[in-house]
Amino acid sequence: MEIKILPNRVIETKDTETLMEALIRHQLPVDNICNGKGTCGKCKVRVMKNASVPSAQDLKHLNEVEIQAGFRLACTVVPEEGMVIQLNFVESQDRKESALLGMKAAVLDPRMEKICVTISKPSLEDERGDWDRLADALSTSTGRSYNSPRLYVLSKVSDVLRADKYVITVTIFENEILEIEQGDTAKRLYGVAIDIGTTSVGLALYDLIEGDLKKVVSIENEQTAYGADVISRISFAKESKENALAMRNAVRRTINHLLKELELKTDVRKNEIVKMSIVGNTTMHHLLIGLDVSHLAVSPFVSVCNRPLEFSAHELGVEINPQAKIFLLPNIGSFVGGDTVGAIVGAPEVLEPGNHLLIDLGTNCELFLKTDNLMMACSTAAGPAFEGAGIAYGMRAKQGAIESVSITDNGVNCEVIGGQEPIGICGSGLIEAIDEMKRAGVINKQGKIAVPETADNLSVELRNRIRTAEKAREFVLAYGTDQRSDVTISQKDVGELQLAKGAVCAGIKTLVEMAGISVAELDSVILSGTFATYLKANNILNIGLVPDIPPEKIKMVGNAAHVGAIRTLLNHQEMNMTEELYRKIRHIELGGSATFSSYFMNSLYLERLS
């Protein structure tokens, strides 16, 4: 049967599938935090025609206003002929490009070069083969030998030589000829650095001759249709070879979509891109390549490969020059991946003399500690709360997301991305909101929302914003409209944030203790990740996300993992350094650690923690 997806898409559905399954099959965007189990309430769609009777899950997760407006959960809707659906499209706010503008390698050494040579024409006196003629001319120009041509180059050399009066441009990586082109194209040499996040994928296009940024583009990782976090995606991929293939194709499709967008927005053709560096956590790394992820989430948590890897674009199905070199940064462990190594490279101050802690905050949280004697790294089971998953009105940092909150006796002031009416709250807004609620007395250090009837310390306005919902209290940040519900923070939301921040704080304390130093001896705490860029030092200290240290020791460095990918793209010495880091960093597994468990229980309080 056919259903219409506004504004102008018509899709075919199968008799045996839900609307969620149909949307995923047709590669249409839909939040799928719980992998279609009906427990997260995030896959809202609006049924404009032929709306079904609300399911039990609809009634649990949607309020009366939303139900009446036709909102349903896609995972519970059975498609009907003539159904008209409006997806909850919200334009993504690109916060990545500003963080990368002006970023340039101190040393530009991509090991990739283009050389234009003019070849002598063959004659009866000079009967050398076309390849031999080219190799000799190159050797004269560079002083290097080229003795192992690729079949790809050999198969086209005769045509390319004669296409423009024997003027030819050769693309070389170290001593390997990757590509030949007719005429002089020596000024056009490009590379791409990619950050494959669990939530989103970002691409940065660079001129490899000048070292200049051409364009940054990003989009939601299409794998989110199969689950919000790495555990749910590992579980899905383990179910069948078809599922694993679907996950691989989803991330490759995301990358290729962004490459096409780059081509449309710049004067660079995809075939001119000849080098790529990629960072991502170990699960993203494995799913991109098509490796088995089944052992990542079970003890002893073993990956297929941690070493740095190199492939051709053709091998990975990436739509750039098929001979392009693709480099994947090494993993450290099952849940400490190449994105952590990238963050270390992207925030090189963490490698300076002294004691430095790097916290990479995102859908997952990784910690890296460097002292004068050792390097250690671990991941914490923070969960995706910082990205909005598990929070009733949580969402990613898109237009309509509350990103900053201030509370006074007169009420609540919310800053919203895009300046529009709020529809949810992103991670930075959640952290600031809970800090403000604690400061105002709406919640206490245990995280309990006040009982309005006995909260004499609160103004009437703030007491009126506290109400009972689903056997627990919630606090209204922003009142809704006829078609949009109120944006609230519930008792459960506060608890989710406490669990996430408690895991991070406990991980820090455990790592510091294992290194034989104290928190006070840390010279710096560096927070990386696009999300972390928008945090305020006082907020994260006040809620105990990090142990209590002087705020001037805390530094936000933006998306350091992506910066690391860029640095390795522009300077191949940095890529070589990642192998040294991979060998030196000791991976710490916190699961089952009594020390971590002890610290975790004491890190749940919403207060400055020693």
Image: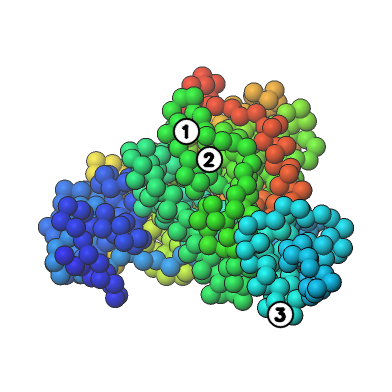
Which residue is painted at 62% across and 43% down in the image? 309
Which residue is painted at 86% across and 64% down in the image? 141
- Residue denoted by label 2: 282
Compared to residue 473, the image places residue 520 above or below, namely above
* Camera-side mark, 2 or 3: 3
Asked whether 16 or 229 is in front, the reply is 16
**Quadrant in the picture for residue 202:** bottom right
Does label 1 or label 2 sit earlier along the sequence? 2
Distance of mark 2 from mark 3, alpha carbons? 46 Å
Q: Which mark is residue 164?
A: 3
* Camera-side mark, 3 or 1: 3
The kind of residue tagged 1 is Leu
The kind of residue tagged 2 is Thr
* x, y percent for residue 216: 59, 65
Which residue is painted at 66% across and 61% down in the image? 154
Which residue is painted at 57% across and 53% down in the image? 195
In the rendered structure, the answer to whether residue 82 lies left or right of residue 108 reads: left
Does label 2 or label 3 sit earlier along the sequence? 3
Does label 3 or label 1 sit earlier along the sequence? 3
Circles 1, 2 touching at the beta carbon (< 8 Å)? yes
- Residue denoted by label 1: 296
- Looking at the image, the residue that sits furthest to the front is 124
